[in-house]
Amino acid sequence: MHRQPAKVLEPDDVRLLLARVATQRHPKRNRVLVLLSFKAGLRACEMAGLTWPMVLTSSGEVGDKITMPPGVAKRGKPRTIPLHKKLRTSLTKLHGAVGRPSSGPVIRSERNAHMTPRSIVNWFRGIYGELGLVGCSSHSGRRTFITTSARVLARTGGSLRDIQELAGHSALTTTERYIQGSRDAQRRLISLL
């Protein structure tokens, strides 16, 4: 049986998701979880393994990138991901709220330890269920990140290889499977021919 890929969310769905996490018990942490998924394309295992040294500069401030080491990245493929402005702001607020640590997990559980990948998967399942967003999973943010990146690629002067590197995929064919087409874009394209 072939599983359906995780749903790609529209900007309104992401805004709804961010509004919902703002009302939850750990709003700063949960906002960072959402933005790590949608603005950095991290997998649940990477969110669980993310530590402060991976996002902090040598002076202890949140920097402008995530440095994903081999031990955390899937299949040991390290990568560097520039921080989106909203994610950087949210990480800075979370960092201050938890006492500006120089080490330890960025995403902490109720017991103040690393959240496990399974806990993160379950957290996303729960929030999508609360919002009635069907077909979504912890991978929806990653798939949305890759699809959105592909849609704006022409404006950046980049290539699909850049998206592949940001996603941490070994093969470009894997990256291509994440990208959802747009019927509206296809109609506009045909009308220009």
Image: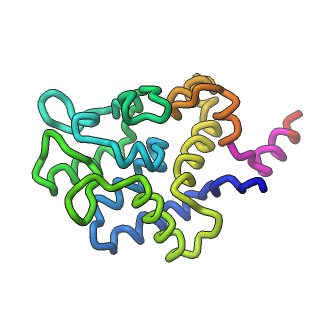
Residue 84 percent across, percent down from the top left: 39, 41
Residue 146 percent across, percent down from the top left: 58, 41
Q: Residue at left 43%, top 34%?
A: 73
Instruction: Say whether residue 136 is left or right of residue 184.
Output: left
Vertical placement of 176 versus 87: above or below? above
Judge from the rendering whether residue 40 lies leftward or rightward of residue 148; answer left or right. left
Q: Look at 70% across and 39% down and name the residue there.
A: 177
Look at the image and tell me in which quarter the N terminus lies: bottom right
Residue 192 lies in quadrant: top right
Residue drawn 44% across the image and 57% down it: 118
Q: Main secondary structure of the magenta part?
A: helix
* In magenta segment, residue 182: yes
In the shown orientation, is residue 125 left or right of residue 3? left
- The residue located at (38%, 47%) in the rendering is 47
Magenta region, residue range: 179-189
Q: Which of the two residues, 169 or 30, is positioned nearer the viewer here?
A: 169
Question: Horizontal and vertical percent for residue 49?
Answer: 34, 43
Q: Is residue 78 above or below residue 61?
A: above
154, 40: nearer the viewer? 40
